[in-house]
Image: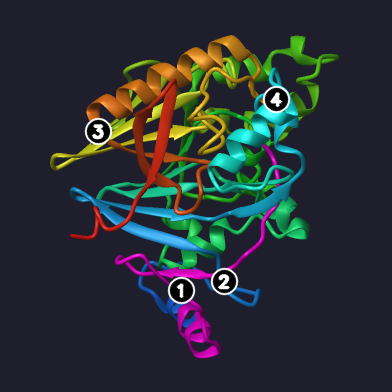
Amino acid sequence: MTGSGIGRRTLLGTAGFTILASPAIIANRAAFAQNNSKASSKLAIDRVTPPDINKFKLGSFEVLVVKDGARASGAPNETFGTNQSAETVGELLAKNFLPKDQFVNGFSPALIDTGSDVILFDTGFGKAGHAMGAGRLIEGMAAAGYMPADVTKVVLTHLHGDHIGGLMEDGKPAFENASYITGKTEYDFWVDPARAGTPAEANHKAVLASVKPLAEKMTFIGEGDQVVPGITGMLAPGHTPGMMIYNIESAGRRLVLTADTANHFVLSLQRPDWEVKFDMDKAKAAATRKKVFDMIATDKVAFLGYHMPFPSVGYAEKLDTGYRFVPKSYQFDI
């Protein structure tokens, strides 16, 4: 999915408390980002407030979620439940205290510090999103004490524009010291010249411009392959032909990074069978949604979804024909 961003509040520190940033706090955050021992270069945070971030522990791993951006979009039924009537979609939204005529789409890349690797999952919009208020990943990383040069691996769950837009900065790799990982099925699909002249052509060109130049530093993985010990890939096709999601385990704690398996916390989870405009194979995407969230609900494990309401982490509880989203609160802070 695609969109742009609006900054609102700052989520500070490991406790995840949300506070309204004062000028003094903003100055201190910017100073911290520039002076932190991990910072390899200076970064000016040029907005009124830094991006929303959330940090928490998962066993011995540290997880950082950054709000790259968000936007209010148009009629929900034009994106979700496209095989349903507008009235049916609106009724489900109203039942969940949501407006019928618009929805908010957020974008949340994640960084995992294992102690030996700093692994970034997806890259947001990059500079191309700045005019729309998006592309705030690097700012958010800096606010948490990480700079682009600290990233050792970049994992691309799939190759849609809102996940690969931050790979390049001014024609050069944005994460200069990183190697890259993506699914082989996904990569082969998007670089194939057969995409020319099809609805996938625009994204094909974006992949050729931003992803293919990094191929020499890229590892292509499939079902069951490890990124590092504790982080294992799982094939989750449908949204794209070769999207990968990741099972993350450390010291007895577990998190599933679900990427775009579900793109709305009500419409995609409570009605996983409903068709979604951006799912390339709609039947396969629905089957994947049910398989993945059945596992998450049955195992009672947390998941991190790229388009879930920030901080994008929560649980899925079985409800009727689908699942109810239960947002993260303090589970990882104690």
User: Counting residues from the N terminus, which is met first, the one under dot 1 or under dot 2?
Assistant: 1
Disc 1 and disc 4: Cα gap in Å?
39 Å
Pair 4/2: label in front: 4
User: Counting residues from the N terminus, which is met first, the one under dot 1 or under dot 3?
Assistant: 1
Residue extending furthest toward the right: 197
Pair 1/4: label in front: 4
Instruction: Name the residue nearer the viewer: 124 or 93.
Output: 93
Q: Are marks 1 and 2 in contact (CB under 8 Å)?
A: yes
User: Counting residues from the N terminus, which is met first, the one under dot 4 or under dot 2?
Assistant: 2
Q: Residue 62's quadrant in the figure?
A: bottom left
Q: Label 4 amino acid?
A: Lys
Above or below — where is 181 with respect to 234? below
Circle 4: element type = loop
Which residue, given by chain and number where applicable, does mark 1 sit on?
Answer: 33
Q: Label 1 amino acid?
A: Ala
Circle 1: element type = helix
Which residue, given by chain and number where applicable, does mark 4 sit on?
Answer: 277
Residue 107 lies, in percent from the top left, at: 58, 47
Task: Let me know if residue 16 is in the magenta part.
Answer: yes
Instruction: Name the residue nearer the viewer: 263 or 176.
Output: 263
Circle 3: element type = loop
Which residue, given by chain and number where applicable, does mark 3 sit on?
Answer: 300
Disc 4 and disc 2: Cα gap in Å?
37 Å
Above or below — where is 9 with respect to 187? below
Q: Residue at x 58, y 51 (%)?
A: 174
Q: Quadrant of the N terminus?
A: top right
Q: Label 3 amino acid?
A: Lys
Which segment did they paint magenta? 1-30
Q: Are marks 4 and 2 in contact (CB under 8 Å)?
A: no
Q: Residues within 10 Å of mark 3 (few under 14, many from 20)?
A: some
Q: Residues within 10 Å of mark 2 (few under 14, many from 20)?
A: some
